Image (cartoon, grey):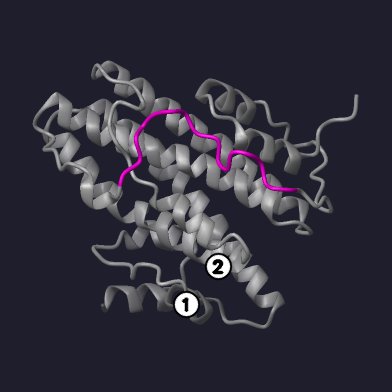
Amino acid sequence: MTPTPLRLAARDALALTELPAKLSAVAALDLTAPCGAELALTPPTPLPGRPARPELIPPSQLAQRGLGTREGRAALIHALAHIELNAIDLALDIVWRFAGLPDAFYRDWLGVAQEEAEHFQLLNAHLNTLGHQYGDFPAHNGLWDMAERTADDLLARLALVPRTLEARGLDVSPGIQAKLRQVGDLDAVAILDVILRDEIGHVALGVRWFAEFCAARGLEPVAHAEALRLAYRAPRPRGPFNLAARRQAGFADAELAALDAR
């Protein structure tokens, strides 16, 4: 039987609305299968597939809860799980959406989708130990909003999602871990150790592929990333910055120095 091209499989997984089905489909992706780089695919319906919960509301309406209570810790873990679920969808979306790219590009991002699914499952299992499940708290749609805004520009997608929004995750992880450590949630700290390690690799893929595609177009990556940030009105990165993690992810010293000087 001819295997389903990976880009088509990614599109179909993205459209799944039931979490168990989506997670199973992502885990089942065979990264040795043909990619189908040449395929002209139509958008799935829905885009992306989502469970009925959580309710999505503007970020400004999300309640701020302290970590000193079980409910507060559960809300934080839920927010992190929501980020990871969005990250699965983002990785699937970049694979099906952009045709004609190297097979290695598609395989890289499907590997990311599989790791993000593992992160979601770790967080959701921990959320269950706190008496909650995914969907119990409201969430926002900021990550997917950026995916929609960059749907027609591969360089903008790479610059503003892995290089900007996901790199922000590298910056905030140590502070979140410190707060969780203070309230004694060492299991959550250990999960975030795994996620931070993997996310450095995910951001590194964004940095590397963005630089490679910029070079092919005669563009200087750092300057073009800033131009795209301004053009798309993306948030300016703000400190404190996890410079060590960003350096591991491939950010140039000059770009890190410029960030740290702000």
| Relative to 100, 132 lies left or right | left
User: 45 above or below 74?
Assistant: below
Instruction: Name the residue located 40 percent from the left edge and 36 percent from the top edge.
Output: 194
Asked if the residue under mark 2 is in contact with the one under mark 1, i.e. CB atoms within 8 Å, the reply is yes
Q: Which of 121 and 71 is in front in this view?
A: 71
| Quarter of the view holding residue 197 | top left
Q: Which of marks 1 and 2 is in front?
A: 1
User: 139 above or below 162?
Assistant: above
At mark 2, the secondary structure is: helix
Amino acid residing under circle 2: Ala
Percent across and percent down for residue 169 are: 36, 51
At mark 1, the secondary structure is: helix
Q: Categorize mark 1 by other alpha carbons within 10 Å: few (<14), some (14-19), many (20+).
A: few
Q: Which of 219 and 81 is in front in this view?
A: 81
Q: First in sequence: mark 1 or mark 2?
A: 2
Q: Which of 259 and 136 is in front in this view?
A: 136
| Quarter of the view holding residue 210 | bottom right
Q: Residue 231 carries which label?
A: 1
The residue to which callout 2 is attached is 156
Instruction: Name the residue located 23 percent from the left edge and 33 percent from the top edge.
Output: 75
| Relative to 19, 46 lies left or right | right
Distance between the alpha carbons at the discs numbered 1 and 2 = 9 Å
| Quadrant occupied by the C terminus | bottom left
| Quadrant occupied by the N terminus | top right
Percent across and percent down for residue 177 are: 23, 41
Q: Residue 95 carries which label?
A: none
